[in-house]
Image (spheres, grey):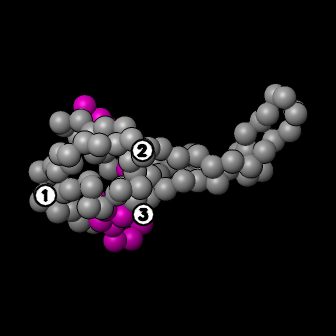
Amino acid sequence: LLSLPLHIKEDENSLENCLASFFEHQELRGANSCYCTHCETRNPSRQGLKLNSLPPILCIQLKRFRNMRGSTQKLNCRVTFPENFDFSEILMKAFTASFSQKKCKYTL
């Protein structure tokens, strides 16, 4: 079992766009930079996630709430999704170089 917590935006969303955003690499700079104990400085870096394999059951959590200034707001946005979803057609960048799994299809 794998659970993916996907953030949604405040406009129209699709499952494919939410997944692409989840697997996008982020640049870490300034206060978010990684601290090097050897040279004792903060260095810019990239943070990301890659999958080695896919589980038989994939659980997708749509994060529909935002915390703003101490209050919680629910986003009432539409999220479209296909009835059948093939990870290998949409998100090849989400896999490691050694990924060799053939079955990447899910029925939603």
Residue stretch in magenta: 1-18
Q: Mark 3 or mark 1, which is nearer to you? A: 1
Residue drawn where x is 25% and y is 31% of the image: 1
Mark 1: which amino acid? Asn
> Residue at the spot x=58%, y=53% of the render?
26
Give yes or no for residue 51 being in the magenta stretch: no
Give whichever of 77, 26 is nearer the camera. 26
Q: Which residue is mark 2?
A: 96
N-term mark: 3 or 1 = 3
Q: Residues within 10 Å of mark 3 (few under 14, many from 20)?
A: some
Residue at image mark 3: 9
Viewer-proximal residue among 67 and 90 = 90
User: Looking at the image, is 79 positioned above or below residue 29?
Assistant: below
Q: Where is 30 relative to 39, above or below?
A: below
* CB contact under 8 Å: marks 3 and 1: no
Q: Are marks 1 and 2 in contact (CB under 8 Å)?
A: no
Image coordinates for residue 99, horizontal then vertical, percent: 34, 42
The amino acid marked with disc number 2 is Thr
**Secondary structure under the numbered disc 1 in the rendered image:** strand
